[in-house]
Amino acid sequence: YSKRDGQFKATRLRVIAITEQPWSQFDTAKGDDPMFSIIKVPALRVRRKDLRAMVKYQLRRLARLRGLANVPEIEDVAMRRLEAYDFPGNTRELFSLVERALDSLPAQEQQQTLTAELFWSAQSVKKLDLFKVDLLTVFPGLRSFLLSDFFPEKLNHNFTKYVYALFVALLFVGPQTRDANFGLNLFWAWWWPGILLTYPVFGRLWCSICPFMIYGEVVQRWQQARGAMLRKWPVKQLEAYGGWFLFSLFYAILVWEEVWNLENTAYLSSWLLLLITAGAVIGSALFERRVWCRYLCPIGGMNGLYAKLSLTEIRASKGVCDSECNTYHCYKGGPAEGQGQATNGCPLHSHPASLKDNRDCVLCMTCLKACPHESVQLNLRAPGVDFGYPFLFPVPGTSSAPQHQPSAHEVALLFLLMGANVCHHIPDVLRQVGWDADSISLALQDKGSHIALSLAALAAPGVIIFLFDSLMQLFHKLLYPSSLIPRKFIDISYAYLPLVWLGSLAHYEDLGLTEAGRVLPLIAKTAHHFVPDWGSLTRPISDILTTVEQRAPTLTASHDVVAFLQGSTLLAGVAMSSLLLQKLGRQHWSAWVHQALMLLLMAEYWAIIID
């Protein structure tokens, strides 16, 4: 409106108003006016790529207002911290953080680089993140070691590859019993207890140095060198059927182990190793990366299940990945970029920022080597985080939604492993139900009946628990139809995981504590087996080996010590499962049914493993 002319005139003036909340007056004022427009800008947390430009703008503005000769810079670590922050106060909070960081420096230093410490408040504290510490930040030297070629490349292809071949040959041609073959002792008395002990700390780390897949890699590299085009994964079919193939193969292996006594038959143990190696080789020859490891390997399936309890995890900062990365070399591979090394991408086709649990991560550090932005983290965490509850730290308010994705085939594998602890002690179970020694001996000598008993022992615990859960669900539906629904069987079944894991460890503790310590005499005894009888020519060697067999030190535990440790292990298992049940059961009355079943299972394990 022109006061001079006393009339309204057209103008090009545009008025810009900003609000962080919806304002009804805007919609009223807009009406049908074509000159009136509303632009909705997404929150800063969903457009992280704008952060760097906005920070630089704010620094330029502050430098101009304060008369600084040079515009301050911001270091990459500080930028990554901002990119990982959710900014509940949106743009205003970002500008305030930058100004506060600049104000934190003395006036004469405000032209220097802003460090991450100045943005200490820019941390999105999630409940479960309170129980995670990035070991690569705490121990900088660890990053240098993991970025080196030694782990796992040189370790696998310069050492493990050759030792494994000799080990398999030793099982074939050496003595055939565990008390005479060093290799058989190493497999059953060292490897099985050892790998069970690694799960709570390192998860699937074994898979990164697994000799089965090393030979798969050898074949795969040969295929690629000759120009072969490896197939893409049939993901839909593998997701639907791969887990059930794994379950079926593991079921068959456990029956084979029990009926044909693989623990004390060297050449059959060797055939078991070759069978799994053949699967890895065939999968690698036909498909890219490690399809066998992710979907089909029975040992990998067990490792992935127990890895959910691990204290360590590989993850990546989603903020850094969203804002800075557009190559995804950690996932799909690529040439060296910045600080990142040239890699073929994650062998299991997993992106570290999208991992929900530890099942599909083997800690091979490929993503760490490939990442040019230092986004990858090696976290030390509380066990149980994958299930949304750090059950060794039951602090009120720390529960959260479970991160892992339950699946039917994984639950079936869990109960199969539960039944394996029963299958290993079939004679003890038969004695409990009233069989005499002669009947037990006859049943186990007949292959048909032994197979039937093994199949039943492997299935029985899971079937019993499923039937009790089904009855409880039916009871609740009939009597309390309007109250809180109990958790589904597939969800609450994971509460048994700690007890199954520690039940398996209790079983193998007997071998580990009574036979593993005899490794030195066994080495001499195994070597003695290969010394030919050439009279006086080889007699000195035989005498030396005989002396070592008789005098080499051994380290074994008494029966009482073994029983005490086995009992402690089982008690720890039922305690951890009970704590996890509190979370997964949502304190519903039906959880007491599973609590009672856990106590009964622990009592059965106690009776057949210890007594």
Image (cartoon, rainbow, N blue to C red):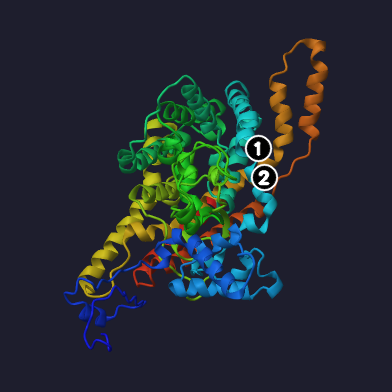
Residue 64, x across and y down, in percent: 57, 71
Residue 508, x across and y down, in percent: 57, 46
Q: Nearer the viewer, residue 43 or 341?
A: 43
Which residue is rendered at x = 47% and y = 66% of the image?
Answer: 389
- The residue that label 1 is drawn on is 150
Say which amino acid is labelled 2: Phe
Q: Secondary structure at mark 1?
A: helix
Above or below: residue 179 compared with residue 510: above
In the image, taking residue 611 as reference, residue 22 lies left or right, namely left
**2 and 1 marks in contact (CB < 8 Å):** yes
Q: Quadrant of residue 264?
A: top right
Above or below: residue 56 compared with residue 187: below
Mark 1 surroundings: few (<14), some (14-19) or many (≥20) residues within 10 A: few
**Residue with the most extreme left position:** 32
- The residue that label 2 is drawn on is 145
In terms of sequence position, does the residue under pointer 2 or pointer 1 come before the other? 2
Q: Nearer the viewer, residue 116 or 211?
A: 116
Q: Secondary structure at mark 2?
A: helix
In the image, taking residue 114 as reference, residue 429 lies left or right, namely left
Q: Nearer the viewer, residue 164 or 332?
A: 332
Report the quarter where the N terminus lies.
bottom left
Which residue is rendered at x = 66% and y = 70% of the image?
Answer: 110
Above or below: residue 353 compared with residue 597: above
Above or below: residue 313 compared with residue 114: above
Residue 114, x across and y down, in percent: 63, 65
